[in-house]
Image (tube, rainbow, N blue to C red):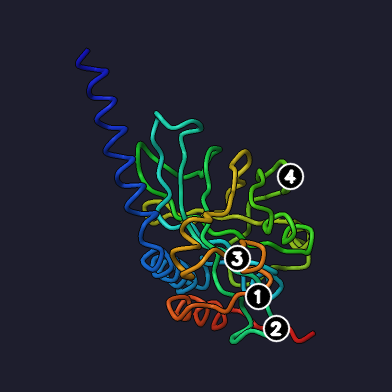
Amino acid sequence: MKTMCFTLALMFSFGAVVRAQEGDEVKRIGEAKTVFQEIMATADKGIPRDLLEKAHCVVIVPAAKRAGFIVGGQYGVGVATCRAPAAAGGWTGVSTVKVEGGSFGLQIGGGETDIVMLVMNDAGAKKLMKSEFTLGGEGAVMAGPIGRAVTAETDGYFRAEILSWSRSRGVFAGVALKGSTLRSDDEDNKDLYGKAVKHEDILLGKVPATAAAKPLLDTLSQYSKVEKK
């Protein structure tokens, strides 16, 4: 009985944390910016600039969590943005997303893991624009490389649909997030934009970016070139 009560209390406590996290979209964007900036600040251990320059979209999920009572054991909320040459800075406004299930890698115990994904081609971008898809199922995903640049021997990375990395307790590494489900967070998008908006329309650049997204988009532009069409 005591064990059951403890488990229920833990579930309600974790649920409250999740709801609080989901209810603060602006904070989520700021955390995503911080995560990306910290990762890229160390060039020799960050995401290769070559890949960033070619990426069609970026997904950042700060502080994803693991808890045994959640199916799949993993849960994270984050943001996604895609290339938009006509948009200021070359990136669309952000769409809020959730990642659930699968394995985020590098976790020890009940710790938190930051996740970054690069969508490398049109096929991957189209899947990202769906309201929900499974990484490694509908969306082929592979662990991304770390370092200053990608050499000719690793050109297979450019052909991947989605590359992914995770950071836990200061350790940053490529990780294949197979089995995780990524879906749009429509309620948080409604709160962020002040009206109901479609996940796909945001990522296609049809919805103007909010002021809250500017620091993140500026940071992405700082580390990646915007290709002219």
Observer-nearest of 60 and 183: 183
Question: Which residue in the protein does label 2 denote?
Answer: 85
Q: Residue furthest front?
A: 195
Indicate the secondary structure of the residue bearing disc 4.
Answer: loop
Q: Position of residue 138 (x, y in %)?
A: 74, 44
Q: Earlier in the sequence, mark 1 or mark 2?
A: 2
Foreground mark, 1 or 4, reads: 1
User: Which corner quadrant holds the N terminus?
Assistant: top left
**Disc ID at residue 205:** 1
Q: Amino acid at mark 2?
A: Pro
Instruction: Label 3, secondary structure: give it.
Output: strand
Mark 1 or mark 4, earlier in chain: 4
Q: Residue at x 24, y 17 (%)?
A: 3
Question: How far apart, in angstroms, are the residues tagged by discs 1 and 4?
Answer: 23 Å
User: For this rendering, which residue is in front, 54 or 8?
Assistant: 8
Image spot of residue 172 (x, y percent): 48, 56
Q: Amino acid at mark 4?
A: Glu
Dot 1 falls on a residue whose secondary structure is loop
Q: Are marks 1 and 2 in contact (CB under 8 Å)?
A: no
Residue with the mark numbered 3: 58
Say what amino acid the circle numbered 1 marks: Gly
Q: Is residue 215 above or below residue 2?
A: below
CA–CA distance between discs 2 and 3? 15 Å
4 to the left or right of 53 = left
Provide the residue designation for mark 4. 138
Separation of residues labelled 1 and 2 (CA atoms): 9 Å
Sooner in the amino-acid sequence: mark 3 or mark 4: 3
3D distance between C-alphas at marks 4 and 2: 27 Å
Residue at the spot 57% in from the left edge and 64% down from the top edge:
80
Q: Which residue sits at x=67%, y=83%?
A: 226
The disc, 2 or 3, on the residue closer to the chain's N-terminal end is: 3
Could you say where residue 38 lies in the image, as x and y percent from the top left?
42, 69
